[in-house]
């Protein structure tokens, strides 16, 4: 009998209850007790949703982040957060969010946050140093175990494995993280013994680091760690996900654990290799339903390959989602507005559990036992495959016919730069901003009333035009050189385009946790992408009509639109990206025709699409850069193409950034003190560049002097003729009161730099 289990369930709640409770608590409007009660209620709900499974995860709930929970479980709490009295949750949130400086103390710095593997979830990085010590505090996990049992589910505690825990951490003192392993393992042994004493049969121990490229010392650490945990307590299911094991496959099967979970969606090709090297008696858990997308699984196809495996393994075969459901929305049942056809293709966390149960029943009894469900599924898969809304032959032919010439500017940068210099007559150190201006409450209200049908189109149009005019006048007053229209009409830089492209759909409640209380609702890219009509030309043309200065047309690039969406699983990501590129290319050309001479195409998410394995980076960068070039480069030499990226870790991909061949790139650098430009010691970025000089994440207003100093630093790395002066990113989250003085200082700093140079 195959067993069905889950690796983790979304904790935010179907209506984002956790988010609202967290935020209320942080504002002081919800007590510890009330927050705890809400947490308990969410866990109950989740367990009830999963109660038909053979094993249900416990410990996947967290009030902020599961890695931070692991740090508390292991007693690795930064000293600065420990100090002080109060509820344990206070210390927890102190690490998660920091605390502003008060009258009596200097505040507490928040823990560093970074991306969880290749997802858009962010975790709190464990802080490590030679001094780090560990001490088990299993109170929270044990309490949740008791709760789960009261609910009547078969509980399976979930913990992060010791090697992945260290792998996720950062040694601030530069020490070797692995040197902590001998101190860490006894705590894990104690934990496993404790759980065994509580009668826990199986523990899921997550080791996703096994899907990354590991050096020999990290591989050895796996052997050491699991040798040490052997026989310590409950049985171990070693869970890997997000990719294939590759060269770590034999390492994984050699570890003395009781079972292994493989992501059989992204590592489908490894199922048989794993099966044949799996030692006698081990459990094989196959993640056959994707925990990363929102599509129904093809159950018939899954059964075709699972049936012989079930024959062979019997009750040693377990079925699960590929990874925790943390990365998908909770329940499709809450979506009322999706059209029925599209809806019939989708599965959120709740529906994915149901798919697993159908698979389990088909394997344990026979397909006939779930015939109706299988028929439904097959009909949905067929309708999606053949739908005219998914398949657009014109778009497919256009992608087939792509040639690299499409991505080629007519002339090289030097020649273009000369033509553009003549046309624009910009001063040295030209000043500009990244696109958005403050999104005031009035702007937000107008947008949401318009959406709700409470504000008429003509009224809305007038109000947005007034906002554009305000932004233009302010920029002229400030004396900025290249202007923007301010993006008042945009709620989100991806959603705005998705809503106007064919092939995109939007859920109402398809929220996914990004970090802490922050959730995102990725649009759903479901079909071949086309652009029925221009998306930005009207606003931009109006903005340009208000001023003699060059106005930037503002677009989001194909790679960013792709990386921030739920994407198709029926074609490679690259194919969808090329389609997006062609749609954006049409927009670029329409802007050019409308007389817009500077066009910025933001690629804020290009870097985060990098695959987990470096060996796969080049392939990704090739199609990502190609897509950008196709979108951007179909313009005349006179048209200046800008791109923007909100990060500065470029060292390892600088060649690809250069290959995009944008005339100007603006990037985030102010907080890192121009550190990014170190990449240029090795590689000279050939085109123009605007390293950010105004940290828009902070309410601080940079002084003229600070900006001059930053730019002087930059001028040591990049010839001053090729430098621009601009903020780190868009200004939409700031107030006009902060933005105006900051930009004033930026403009006067540019003037001083020009004078110094002259
Ligand atoms: N043009 C966008 C803005 O200014 C860019 C945002 C981003 O890079 N995240 O808001
Ligand atoms: Zn940015």
Image: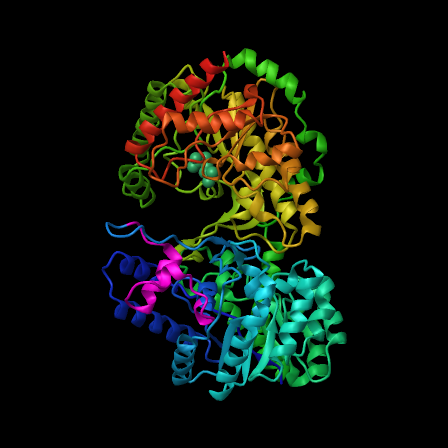
- Residue 548 in the image, given as x and y percentages of width and height: 41, 14
Q: Is 77 included in the stretch rendered in magenta?
A: yes
Quadrant observed for ligand 1 in the rendered image: top left
- Residue appearing at x 46%, y 79% in the figure: 51
Residue 556, image x, y percentages: 51, 37
- Which residue is rendered at x = 45% and y = 51% of the image? 506
Q: Nearer the viewer, residue 428 or 571?
A: 428
Left or right of 149: which side holds 297?
right
Give how far across and how far down residue 381 sits, in percent. 60, 62
Q: How many marks?
A: 0
Query: Residue 336 sits in which quadrant?
Result: bottom left
Is residue 604 depicted above or below 140 in this figure? above
Q: Which residues are magenta?
A: 72-101
Q: Residue furthest front?
A: 131
Left or right side of 106 for 602? right
Quadrant holding the N terminus:
bottom right
Q: Quadrant of residue 379?
A: bottom right
Q: Percent x, y for residue 393?
A: 65, 43
Q: Does 612 lie within the magenta span?
A: no
Q: Is residue 581 visible?
A: yes
Q: Residue 553 versus residue 755: which sits nearer the camera?
A: 755
| Figure colour scheme | rainbow
Vertical order, 746 against 669 (above or below): above
Residue 389 visible in the picture: no
Looking at the image, which residue is at 46% across and 61% down? 329
Q: Quadrant of residue 301?
A: bottom right
């Amino acid at each position: 009998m195959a067993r069905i289990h889950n690796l983790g369930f979304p904790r935010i709640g179907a209506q984002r209850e956790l988010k609202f409770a967290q935020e209320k608590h942080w504002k002081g409007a919800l007590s510890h007790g009330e927050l705890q009660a809400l947490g308990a209620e969410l866990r109950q709900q989740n367990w009830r949703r999963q109660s038909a499974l053979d094993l249900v995860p416990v410990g996947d709930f967290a009030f902020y982040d599961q890695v931070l929970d692991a740090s508390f479980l292991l007693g690795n709490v930064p000293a600065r957060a420990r100090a002080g009295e109060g509820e344990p949750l206070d210390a927890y949130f102190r690490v998660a969010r920091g605390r502003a400086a008060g009258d009596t103390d200097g505040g507490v710095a928040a823990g560093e946050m970074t991306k969880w593997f290749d997802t858009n979830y962010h975790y709190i990085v464990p802080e490590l140093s030679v001094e780090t010590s560990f001490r088990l505090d299993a109170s929270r996990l044990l309490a949740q175990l008791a709760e789960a049992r009261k609910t009547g589910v078969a509980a399976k505690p979930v913990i992060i494995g010791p090697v992945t825990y260290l792998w996720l951490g950062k040694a601030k003192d530069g020490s070797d993280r692995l040197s902590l392993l001998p101190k860490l393992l006894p705590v894990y042994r104690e934990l496993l013994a404790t759980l065994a004493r509580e009668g826990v049969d199986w523990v899921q121990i997550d080791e996703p680091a096994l899907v990354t490229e590991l050096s020999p010392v990290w591989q050895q650490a796996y052997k050491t760690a699991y040798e040490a945990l052997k026989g310590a307590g409950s049985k171990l299911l070693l869970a890997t996900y997000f990719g294939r094991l590759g060269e770590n496959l034999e390492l994984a099967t050699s570890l003395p654990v009781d079972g292994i979970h493989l992501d059989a969606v992204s590592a489908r090709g490894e199922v048989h290799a794993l099966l044949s090297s799996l030692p006698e008696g081990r459990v094989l858990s196959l993640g056959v339903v994707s925990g990363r997308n929102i599509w129904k699984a093809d159950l018939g196809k899954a059964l075709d390959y699972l049936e012989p495996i079930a024959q062979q393994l019997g009750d040693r075969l377990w079925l699960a989602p590929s990874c925790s459901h943390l990365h998908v929305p909770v329940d499709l049942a809450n979506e009322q507005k999706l059209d029925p056809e599209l809806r019939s293709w989708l599965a959120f966390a709740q529906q994915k559990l149901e798919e697993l149960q159908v698979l389990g029943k088909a394997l344990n009894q026979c397909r006939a036992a779930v015939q109706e469900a299988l028929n439904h599924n097959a009909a949905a898969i067929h309708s999606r495959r053949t739908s005219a809304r998914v398949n657009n032959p014109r778009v497919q032919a256009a992608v087939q016919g792509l040639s690299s010439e499409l991505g080629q500017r007519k002339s090289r940068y030097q020649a273009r730069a000369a033509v553009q210099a003549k046309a624009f007559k910009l001063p040295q150190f030209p000043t500009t901003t990244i696109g958005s201006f403050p999104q005031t409450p009035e702007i937000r209200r107008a947008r949401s009333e318009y959406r709700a049908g409470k504000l008429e189109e003509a009224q809305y149009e007038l109000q947005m035009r007034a906002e554009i005019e305000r932004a233009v006048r302010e920029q002229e007053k400030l004396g900025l050189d290249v202007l923007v229209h301010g993006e008042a009409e945009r709620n989100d830089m991806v959603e705005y385009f998705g809503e106007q492209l064919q092939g995109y759909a939007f859920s109402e409640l398809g929220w996914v946790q990004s970090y802490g209380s922050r959730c995102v609702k990725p649009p759903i890219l479901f079909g071949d992408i086309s652009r029925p009509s221009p998306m930005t030309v009207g606003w931009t043309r109006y903005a340009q009509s208000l001023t003699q200065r060059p106005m930037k047309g503002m677009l989001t690039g194909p790679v960013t639109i792709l990386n921030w969406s739920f994407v198709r699983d029926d074609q490679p990501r690259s194919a969808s990206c090329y389609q997006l590129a062609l749609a954006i290319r049409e927009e670029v050309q329409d802007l050019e025709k409308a007389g817009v001479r500077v066009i910025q195409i933001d690629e804020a998410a290009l870097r985060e699409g990098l695959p987990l394995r470096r060996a796969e980076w080049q392939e990704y960068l090739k199609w990502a850069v190609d897509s950008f070039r196709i979108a951007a480069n179909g313009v005349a030499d006179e048209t200046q193409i800008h791109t923007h990226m909100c990060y500065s870790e470029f060292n390892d991909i600088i060649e690809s950034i250069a290959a995009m061949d944008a005339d100007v790139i603006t990037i985030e650098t102010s907080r890192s003190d121009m550190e990014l430009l170190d990449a240029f010691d090795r590689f000279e970025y050939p085109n123009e560049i605007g390293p950010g000089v105004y940290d828009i994440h902070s309410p601080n207003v940079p002084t003229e002097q600070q900006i001059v100093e930053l730019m002087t630093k930059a001028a040591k790395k990049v010839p001053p003729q090729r430098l621009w002066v601009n903020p780190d990113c868009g200004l939409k989250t700031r107030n006009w009161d902060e933005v105006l003085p900051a930009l004033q200082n930026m403009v006067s700093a540019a003037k001083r730099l020009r004078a110094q140079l002259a």
